[in-house]
Image (spheres, rainbow, N blue to C red):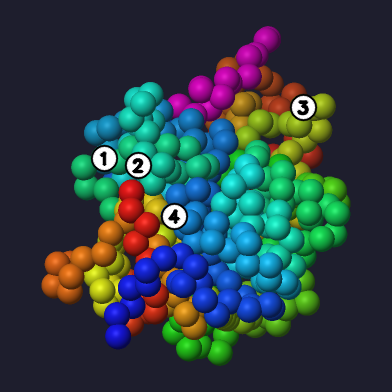
Amino acid sequence: MSKVYPDVPTALEGLNDGDTIMIGGFGMAGQPLELIEGMLDLGLRELTLISNNAGNGDTGLAGLLATGQVRRIICSFPRQHDSWVFDNLYRAGKLELELVPQGNLVARIEAAAAGLGAVYTPVGYGTALAKDKEVRQINGRGHVLEYPLHADFALVKAHIADTYGNLLYRKTARNFGPIMAAAAKTSVVQVTRVVAPGEIDPEVVVTPGIFVQRIVAIGQ
Amino acid sequence: MSWIALSKEEMARRVADDIFHSAYVNLGIGMPTLVANYLDPQRNIMLHSENGVLGMGPTPAFGSEDADLINAGKQPITIIPGAAFFHHGDSFAMMRGGHIDVCVLGAFQVAMNGDLANWSTGDEDAIPAVGGAMDLAVGARNVWVMMLHTTRDGKPKIVRNCDYPLTGLGCVNRVYTDLCVLDVKDDGFWLRDIVQGLELDELQSLTDAPLNINI
């Protein structure tokens, strides 16, 4: 069965109320804009998003937050000079925030991908972001116990896919794509173009196709 | 005697002078970014950005920006020959795992035990954001802070204890301010350098923590 879906709406079939959705990107780089736009009119409720930022301007992730479908966001850096959509929802109490140091966000996503029960990380130890968390001294250094972040879906932007879902990315748009694709139950990847198996050199595959369930070609 | 505080550019040059040959370096958002302008090209220093690049080059010429090629501050960048791209898992392994030789961070406060406060002022109404600051504070081999010596209204930022929320415990090795350079050792701050004309007792009066002097 090919993983290539004909368009965004079919690639997003099966998203449900209450789902947890990872969204790739760092700022605008790697943000899967077309997939996010495909979510705008779904009319879902009580979604949890996992994403490094919480949107810029009024489009993309910010546009999705503005639809009111999202209840909670797990994120490392919501504040931007143009994050007014998030800022207003957060101040109005309409959006819950779990603020996570960026590397702990990464480690928790990777833990889910790798099937680990939890990870001990030195990052955040002794700070407000580790408040009430289990801690342990390992080799004389304080560590915080952090649990994996699982997701129902990951929405990711890559550059080129083959029909098996092997992926190449472009420059710093790679960022969270590979780890989120590996962590979610269903990874939906938008790409510039899809090529035949064998056209991507196996030596340079960044995300192996086993981590990808759905591909949709968006074009340039 | 009179003295003149260093400009931001002079501070950046001072930090850049101390970055050693072949170092892998992460420059924080804000003032530390200026350090890149003064690095000696002969030293083969590799700049890391948390969003997945080693080998950052200068700012691109107007019109040749690439939206897929940005730094941690989301500004367009270029890369140098020998650069590498990687995903966030690898990038934070570099940071957390002790592979970054030097990181230069801005700060609100640094305490005499090396505690760093640079991510939050504790203001309840502020939109929070932490990013990779805690990862760098804990994981880089040398954590250098670059900041003004006092706040805009003259309060010391070099303190006995931080009263802002902490980024990392006992993690700062050195502080570069517009007035001096301080090393953080087991027994507190040690003066390494001071701007010309500034008397030691005057520097101490602008500093909450006691300064050890050996120069």
Q: CA distance from mark 3 to mark 2?
A: 32 Å
Residue linked to disc 1: B80
Disc nearest the viewer among 3 and 2: 2
Badge nearest the viewer, 3 or 1: 1
Look at the image and tell me whether residue B201 can be seen: no
Which mark identifies residue B56?
2
Name the kind of residue labelled 1 in the image.
Ile
Residues in magenta? B1-13
Residue corresponding to mark 3: B152
Query: Rounded to the nearest whole Å, what is the CA distance between mark 2 and mark 4?
Result: 18 Å
* Same chain for the residues under marks 3 and 1 in the image: yes
Q: Amino acid at mark 2?
A: Met
Residue picked out by circle 4: A30
Q: Position of residue A174 (x, y in %)?
A: 38, 58
Q: Residue at x 75, y 24 (%)?
A: B202
User: Closest to the observer: A30 or B170?
Assistant: A30
Q: Nearer the viewer, mark 1 or mark 4?
A: 4
Q: Sequence order check: which comes first, mark 3 or mark 1?
A: 1
Report whether A196 appears left or right of B69. Answer: left
Q: Is B132 on the left or on the right of A197, as rendered?
A: right
Which comes sooner in the sequence, label 2 or label 1?
Answer: 2
In x, y percent, where is residue A2?
29, 80
Q: Tag 4, which chain?
A: A
User: Does mark 3 fall on the same chain as mark 4?
Assistant: no
Structural distance between the alpha carbons of marks 3 and 1:
37 Å
Cβ–Cβ under 8 Å for marks 4 and 3: no
